[in-house]
Amino acid sequence: MRDDDRGRRGGVRAMTRRNARKAWIALADGTVFEGCAAGADGETTGEVVFTTGMTGYQEVLTDPSYCGQIVVMTAPEIGNTGATTEDDEAGKPWVAGFVMHELSPMASNWRSQETLDAYLRRHGVVAIDRVDTRALTRHIRDHGAQAAVIGTSSPEALVAKAKAAPSMAGQDLTGAVTTREPYVWAEGAGVWHVPEGEPTRHVVAVDFGVKKNILRCLVDHGCRVTVVPATTSAKDILAHDPDGVFISNGPGDPAAVAHGIETVRELVGQKPLFGICLGHQMLALALGGKTYKMKFGHRGLNHPVKDLATGRVEITTQNHGFAVDAESLAGKCDVTHVHLNDGTCMGLEHRDSGAFSVQYHPEASAGPHDARYLFKRFVSRMDSAKR
Ligand SMILES: NC(=O)CC[C@H](N)C(=O)O
C-alpha cells in the first residue's frame, strides 16, 4: 500500500509514545496523518509545506517568511541540539505549526539553553510528532501545498476546518511580522567576519519580515543599517539618506503587498537596490512583471542555482512558494540566475537602474555560504554610485 494511501485511508501506523496525547494533521483535501501532540496545547491552521533542510530547525521556526504556514521537517530527528536564543532569526517563532517525525526528548549541545519541546511550549507553538513525515511530504509533493489543521479533537472536525481555511494566495501577511518602529541594527555575525573599521555605507532595509542574518551580513560588509517598517513610504525611506535600499524577505503572496510594490516602484532608479526572496518578487512586480504560486515551492538547504554570468553553480538556501514569471519582464530585466532542478527564475537585474534581486537566501541561516558574494555586489554598487 503506497505511503500516502496509508494517510488517505486513515490506516497510518500510529507511532505513539508513553503518555503523549494522540493528535492529527488534517489537510484540506481530506487526508489525515496521525501523530502525538507536541509543543503547546491547542489547535492551529496554516498552509502545510515541507523543508528538506537537515539542520536549522530553530532558524525555520523563527523565519518570519513562514508566518501562516505549518512546516513539515523531512529530517527524522528534530531537537537533538536543543534550543538557544542565539539561533533565532526573529524575536519569536513565526510558524503557524510544526510537524516532525520524532521530537527528541533530550538535547545534547553545549550551546543549548532548553529542550526544543520546552522552547515550543514557551512560545505557544502547536506541534505534532510521530508523524509519517515521508508520506506526508510525498503527499504534498504530489498533491500540492494546501491548508491544514493540527489538533487533538477528531480527524473529521479537523478536516472540516482545513477545508474552510483560506488559501495562501492573495494573503498579505507582512503587516503581522514587520517592525512597528524604525531601528538601527549594528550587530555583525562576529564569528565569521569582523568588519574592518567604521561602516562606510548606510543601507535602509525595508522590513517585510527580515531575517536577522541578512542584517548581520550587511554589517559584516561594512554597512550601517536602518530597518524601517514595511509601510514606510519611498519619500520617508529616501529621507534617511541611504547609500542603498534593501527589500527584505517575508511571508504571504507578494502580489497582495500592494503598498510595498508601489514603494519599490518609486525607489527604483533613486538608489542602488537589492532584494531577497519576497523582495525579489516585489521588485519584479514593481517593474510590471508577474508572479505565480508554485505547486509546493522550494524549501531546503541544497538547492543548486546557476549564475548565468559566470556559469558557476552555487548551492543555496531556499524558502519560497511563489516565483517570478521571467517572461513577463522580457526586455526590461535580465535573468541572472536559474534553479537547475526546474529552471525557476532565481535572480534578476533591471537593465535601466541596475536594481538586482535573488529568489533564494544568500544569508543562509541555516545553509551554505556559496552566495555571500551578492552582499559584496550590493556594496560595490553603492560605492560606485557614491563616486
Ligand atoms: N522567504 C520569502 O521571502 C518567501 C517569499 C514569499 N512569501 C513566497 O513564499 O514565495
Image (cartoon, grey):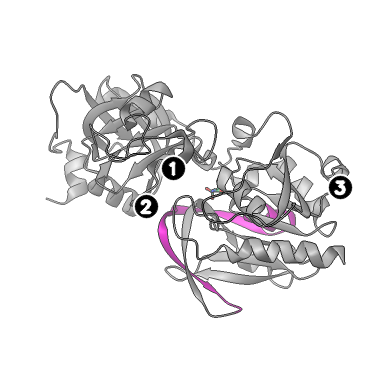
Q: Is mark 2 within 8 Å of ligand 1?
A: no
Segment colored magenta: 280-309
Q: Are marks 3 and 2 in contact (CB under 8 Å)?
A: no
Give whichever of 135, 198 is nearer the camera.
198
Give whichever of 41, 122 is nearer the camera.
122
* Tag 3 residue: 241
The picture places residue 15, in percent across and down from the top left corner, at 14, 35
| Label 1 crowd bin: few (<14), some (14–19), many (20+), radius 10 Å | many
Q: Are marks 2 and 1 in contact (CB under 8 Å)?
A: yes
The residue under the point 57% across, 62% down is 372
Q: Quadrant of residue 222?
A: bottom right
Q: Nearer the viewer, mark 1 or mark 3?
A: 3
* Tag 2 residue: 53
Horizontal side, residue 166 vs residue 48: left or right: right
Q: Chief secondary structure of the magenta span? A: strand
The reply to whether the magenta stretch includes residue 43 is: no
Look at the numbered disc 3 and give the secondary structure of its residue: loop
The reply to whether the magenta stretch includes residue 289 is: yes
| Label 2 crowd bin: few (<14), some (14–19), many (20+), radius 10 Å | some
Label 1 and label 3: CA atoms lie apart by: 33 Å
Look at the numbered disc 2 and give the secondary structure of its residue: loop
Q: Quadrant of residue 80?
A: top left
Query: If you read the primary sequence from the N terminus, does the residue marked by circle 2 or circle 1 appear first?
Result: 2
